[in-house]
Image (cartoon, helix red, strand yellow):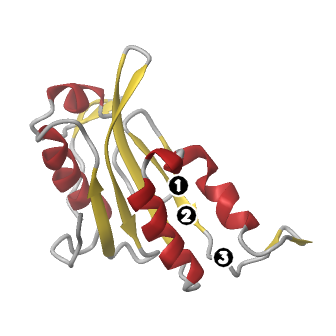
Amino acid sequence: MKKRQWLNGNHMLFESDCKMFNKQCDLITTGNVWGVVQFSQFVRPTNEVECNGCIFKPGELRDYDLRPFFLHQFPSVRKAVMEYADAGQKIILYKFRHFNGQRETVHGFVITDPNYRLLKKFVTGPTYKSWSVIEEAIKYITEDESLPSAE
């Protein structure tokens, strides 16, 4: 993984073609993060039904994990996540975005396994700059960014 460098206490150095994303970049890291430019969390597999001593229906915990991502807007991402979840695999789903006022611009999504190996990446942003954001972000969240990915 690429080592983080700090511009000041609230922003890390991030060098992509998207100046707005770079300026807003507070932190890119692994695991559960609810940040300005990164939203990520572990997604439990469909067959995981126990949480804090309670038993849920298959898929309920997975759906709970996915609710904040609003994946209905990104059907190819949702399909990939469901394939991993239905196969019984725990994953980490990352969403990278920036804000222009209240408007969120989603550059894309990255899926890794819990050992930070890249499984898939999706560029969903409106311009070529989104490719740059996703490619640079992958360096901070994966052990080997050269693994196969698509879309």
- Image coordinates for residue 70, horizontal then vertical, percent: 54, 44
Categorize mark 3 by other alpha carbons within 10 Å: few (<14), some (14-19), many (20+).
Answer: many
- The residue under the point 21% across, 75% down is 144
Q: Tell me what residue is drawn at x 20 percent, y 78 percent.
A: 147
Circle 2 residue: 42
* Direction top: furthest residue: 101
State the residue in front, 72 or 92: 72
As drawn, is 78 to the left or to the right of 57? left
* Three-letter code, disc 1: Asn
Amino acid carrying label 2: it is: Phe
Q: Which residue is mark 1?
A: 32
Q: Earlier in the sequence, mark 1 or mark 2?
A: 1
Q: Nearer the viewer, residue 68 or 75?
A: 75
In-front residue for pair 38/69: 69
Residues tagged 3 and 1 counted as in contact (Cβ below 8 A): no
For image coordinates 59% across by 55% down, the residue present is 66
Quadrant where the N terminus is found in the figure: bottom left
Q: Which of the two marks, 3 or 2, is nearer to us in this view?
A: 3
Q: Secondary structure at mark 3?
A: loop
Q: Element under label 2? A: strand
Q: Classify mark 1: helix, strand or loop.
A: loop
- Left/right of residue 36 with respect to residue 42 in the rendered view: left
Is 119 rendered above or below residue 25? below
Task: Please name the residue that numbered disc 3 is placed on.
Answer: 46
Residue drawn where x is 33% and y is 76% of the image: 117
**Label of residue 116 in the image:** none
Q: Residues within 10 Å of mark 1 (few under 14, many from 20)?
A: some
